[in-house]
Amino acid sequence: AFDPLGSIADICQRHGLWFHVDAAWGGSALLSAKHRSEADSVAWNPHKMLTVGLQCSAFLLRDTSVGPVTPFPSCGRRVDCLKLWLLWKAAGTEGLARRVERAFAFTRYLAEEVKRRDGFQLVLEPEFINLCFWFVPPSLRGREGSPDYWPRLGKVS
């Protein structure tokens, strides 16, 4: 689920609240000027959308002056940021942003293809790059109101 981050950011700003986003899956949108949020801090897992090698996680702060004053234990984790750094060096900021924008474009394209094709039904319009759809077999097409429609669709989906 994705929350309405723009509305939440407005409320936090209006009331002087800290705005943290747990963006483990969606944090790569930070690289896209179009899809970026106004969070004060973000938890991000680049290994998910950017395909950085497992495990790679980051805690990002807009204002670095509020970060830890002294080093803190990494709970036994390896130097996971090296994987992200290497990818960033190879692709560059613009290259990573293009990856993110391309993923959004592919999702929009696939959603339109699902809508156009017989036997496929889009469950919800995509909010991110996740796309939820059903394949409706020929034996169920046009039978949406029948009592056995959903149980039978559930068996093939």
Image (spheres, rainbow, N blue to C red):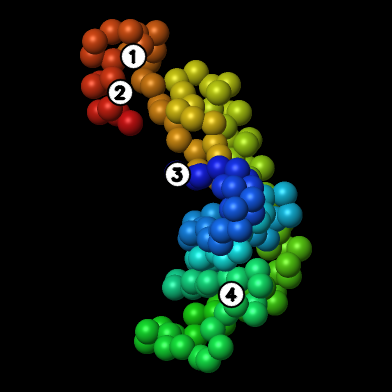
| Above or below, 43 relative to 116 | below
Residue position for label 4: 84
The residue mark sitting in front, 2 or 3, is 3
Q: Closer to the N terminus: mark 4 or mark 1?
A: 4
Q: How far, Cα to Cα, is label 3 from label 1?
A: 29 Å
- Left or right, 95 with respect to 75, comes to right
What's the mark number on residue 1?
3
Callout 3 crowding tier (Cα within 10 Å): few <14, some 14–19, many ≥20:
few
- Left or right, 48 with respect to 64, comes to left
Where is residue 134, by image quadrant? top left
- Left or right, 139 with respect to 11, comes to left
Q: How far, Cα to Cα, is label 2 from label 4?
A: 41 Å
Which residue does the image show at 70% across and 77% down from the upper left? 89
**Mark 4 is on which residue type?**
Leu
Residue position for label 2: 153
What's the mark number on residue 140?
1
Q: Closer to the N terminus: mark 3 or mark 4?
A: 3
